[in-house]
Image: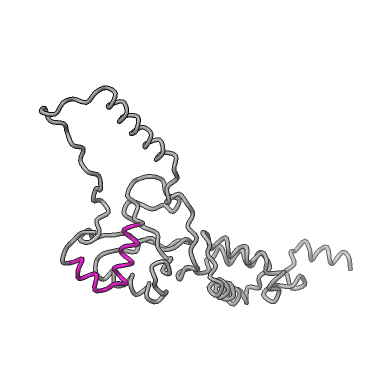
């Protein structure tokens, strides 16, 4: 965060300020692989409760941050919303936190071979630890029910294929949403969570399913029934 008059002004809107802090903290800084497909400068958000906001306050904060020309919304995913910082007046994720390595002057005595070897070993040890420890960006983040999660054509087709009555699919989705919000369920993939809910419907929510006798018969099944008669 940069010290400036703009920063002082933005702090007068604490909800937007907290949202930008979260985005700047999570923003991707390198070209390394990311499971969410994030580009440099992009961040995945949506867990508004982690910064003390309600869904309404979260949506309003995003609109105001966009109006202040601080962020732009890139896309929505099953895991949340991808946004990008577009203004570095307050939060500049490209500012280097590394201090320059002091160069020895000609007046200073040269270090001994023993001290040089020790320093070299320490550096190699630290680098080996960094290469082994997993980064947070590789972990799947579980989030609450996303405000922008909706039925897609593929989810509708999956539900119908698995006995959900096409006339009741919207009501079935509302049941899924209300149950998830009421119990504060969190998943890393909400599409998979909905598909599992569909698979369990015949056992736990049979009123939304098509009965066996209501299924549409294929031409071959009708022909076999005709032979039996």
Residue at 35% from the left image edge and 29% from the top image edge: 121
Tell me if residue 189 comes above or below residue 205 in the rendering: above
- Comparing 146 with 77, the one in front is 146
x then y, percent, for residue 196: 62, 63
Picture quadrant where residue 51 is located: bottom left
**Is residue 116 found left or right of 196 in the rendered image?**
left
x then y, percent, for residue 134: 45, 45
Residue at 30% from the left image edge and 31% from the top image edge: 119
**Is residue 182 found left or right of 38 in the rendered image?**
right
Tell me if residue 72 comes above or below residue 139 in the rendering: below
Q: Which residue lies furthest to the top in this view?
A: 113
Residue at 22% from the left image edge and 61% from the top image edge: 90
Main SS, magenta residues: helix
**Is residue 19 found left or right of 102 in the rendered image?**
right
In magenta stretch: residue 14: yes
Tell me if residue 16 comes above or below residue 132 in the rendering: below
Q: Which residue lies furthest to the right in this view?
A: 229
x then y, percent, for residue 151: 53, 69
x then y, percent, for residue 168: 62, 76
Segment colored magenta: 6-25
In magenta stretch: residue 107: no
The colour scheme of the drawn protein is one colour
Tag count in the figure?
A: 0
- Comparing 141 with 159, the one in front is 141
- The N terminus lies in quadrant: bottom left
Picture quadrant where residue 128 is located: top left
């Amino acid at each position: 965060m940069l010290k400036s008059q703009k920063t002082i002004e933005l702090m007068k809107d604490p909800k937007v300020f907290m949202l930008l802090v979260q985005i700047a903290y999570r923003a991707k800084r390198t070209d390394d692989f990311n499971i969410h497909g994030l580009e440099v400068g992009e961040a995945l958000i949506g867990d508004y409760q982690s910064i003390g906001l309600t869904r309404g306050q979260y949506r309003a904060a995003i609109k105001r941050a966009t109006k202040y020309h601080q962020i732009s919304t890139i896309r929505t995913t099953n895991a949340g919303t991808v946004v990008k910082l577009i203004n570095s007046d307050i939060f500049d994720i490209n500012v280097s936190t590394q201090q320059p390595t002091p160069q020895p002057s000609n007046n200073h005595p040269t270090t001994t071979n023993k001290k040089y070897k020790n320093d070299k070993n320490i550096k190699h040890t630290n680098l080996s630890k960094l290469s082994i420890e997993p980064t947070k960006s590789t972990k799947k983040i579980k989030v609450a029910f996303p405000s922008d999660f909706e039925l897609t054509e593929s989810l509708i087709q999956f539900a119908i294929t698995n006995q959900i009555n096409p006339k009741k699919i919207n009501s079935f989705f509302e049941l899924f949403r209300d149950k998830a919000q009421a119990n504060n369920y969190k998943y890393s993939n909400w599409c998979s969570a909905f598909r599992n809910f569909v698979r369990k419907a015949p056992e736990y929510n049979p009123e939304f399913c098509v009965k066996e006798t209501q299924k549409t018969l294929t031409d071959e099944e009708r022909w076999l029934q005709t032979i039996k008669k």
